[in-house]
Image (cartoon, coloured by chain):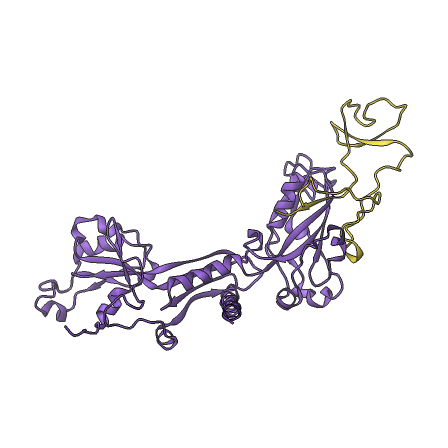
Chain colours: A purple, B yellow
Amino acid sequence: MPHKPPTKEELEERKIVGIKDETITHVSSSDFPGHYPGEDHSWDIESFRRGFSVEFHQNDPFEASFSLIGIDASIANAFRRIMIADIPTLAIETVFINNNTSVIQDEVLSHRLGLIPFKGGHEGLHNFLKWWRKPTDESEINNSYYDNNTVSLRLEIQCEHNEKAAAGETDPTKLYKHAHVYARDIEFCPVGRQDKYFSGADTIAPVNPDILIAKLRPGQEISLSMHMHKGVGSDHSKFSPVATASYRLMPVIKIERPILGRDAEKFMRCFPQGVIKLEKVTKKEAAKKGSGYEGHEGEDKAVVADPMRDTVSRECLRHEEFKGKVKLGRRRDHFIYLVESTGQWESDAIFLESVAHLKKRAQDLEKQVQNMVR
Amino acid sequence: MSREEYQVPTGSGSPTVGGGSFNAPAARDYAGEGGGAIHYICGDCSARVPLDKATGIRCQKCGARVLYKERTKRMVQFEAR
């Protein structure tokens, strides 16, 4: 029997992960050589280029949502993992405590300081600042700090009684001066060429100035200095440039047979708002034999409006009246990313950097393989 | 570096870590005020109480008899992890 090439519908169908009421089917992709007899699915840059597209849904400085369409899960997951663990950021790494008489312990205080996200001039952060490596000889450590690998910060704060407080005041923030220590109290101490890269609007400062670091009472004091270094999320999550970097697959809702009247309204309520909308059955549809709309002119019918907003709760599969009328699924090659930046990078720049990073890694591997076979 | 590995700086008073232009702010000198007297913290009013050999263990301000030692004057180094 000669091979019949697949129709467009069949090709579309192959991309869908089936979601039944209690099972999930067709989980793995099948577009690889040898899976379909007589079809060539070997990877080809031209056919990838034809099938691939990027679509932005939201692009705010600190939150971006976009779709990569026509890409394999392995690559999509690589981008996600690189964004979380391999994009470098600057964070507090060492804390030198001169005095800390607050109730919060030195170790806990240091840990809290490390987790504060900082921002600064992009040119300085991404190009001027280099990696700091701990010298193998411990005694050489003081000669390893330079203006292009270490940023120095200070936190000096003392709590005192506020003489001007009204009698009978109970609010500690009014009763005492500096009862709360916030991230904005951290002071940046530029060294060497850092003045050039981190001044004015580009100064190194916490992204969120209102982060509470500690609480003090009169007589208590915190006096410390800090060193910031560049690092990656795989070393410690404080270096991760993203709060979340995740993806989900595009939901597919297929209404196979008409859902009408009160059923349509109930069907709409099975989904998050905006996923399903109601439309009136037109005269033309009602006139068509075998469409299921005969004699229902003017009634409401359920129509899929925006499947991307669906959470795929499968609620509609629990109800008897929708049995056989609806098919749920997800598109296996449509990844909807959500990237939320902690503030040091623009959220879309994090993704672009992850692409550059994967490319560089691939080129490094290519070089190594070439050396291996030589 | 964990706390156990930490080496006490040899130069008394001035921390050696962060040398060169990265000097941490110098530790304040608590002793040397009031000549020979050691300062304690009152357990009741948290005032700084200078005590020398002759005086009794008592806060001069509120008369409380519970006094605490002050925190070390040495710089302590931690990793922010």
Residue A27 lies, in percent from the top left, at 30, 57
Relative horizontal placement of residue A31, taking residue B27 as reference (left or right): left
- Kindly give the residue lying farthest to the bottom in the view shown: A46
- Kindly give the residue lying farthest to the front in the view shown: A374
Q: Residue at x 47, y 66 (%)?
A: A59
Q: Is residue A133 above or below residue A182?
A: below
In the rendered view of the protein, which quadrant contains the N terminus of chain A?
Answer: bottom left
Q: Count all numbered tags in the image, as a single digit.
A: 0
Q: Residue at x 21, y 72 (%)?
A: A7
Q: Residue at x 40, y 66 (%)?
A: A67
Residue in the foreground of this view, choosing between A144 and A204: A144
Rendering quarter of residue A47:
bottom left
Residue B22 lies, in percent from the top left, at 76, 55
Residue A309 lies, in percent from the top left, at 34, 59
- Kindly give the residue lying farthest to the right in the view shown: B35
Q: Is residue A340 visible?
A: no
Q: Is residue A25 above or below residue A221?
A: below
Relative horizontal placement of residue A351, taking residue A288 as reference (left or right): right
Residue in the foreground of this view, choosing between A255 and A130: A130
Residue in the foreground of this view, choosing between A207 and A329: A329
Q: Is residue A288 visible?
A: yes
Residue A373 lies, in percent from the top left, at 49, 70
Q: Is residue B9 above or below residue A233?
A: above
Residue in the foreground of this view, choosing between B50 and B78: B78
Rendering quarter of residue A179:
top right
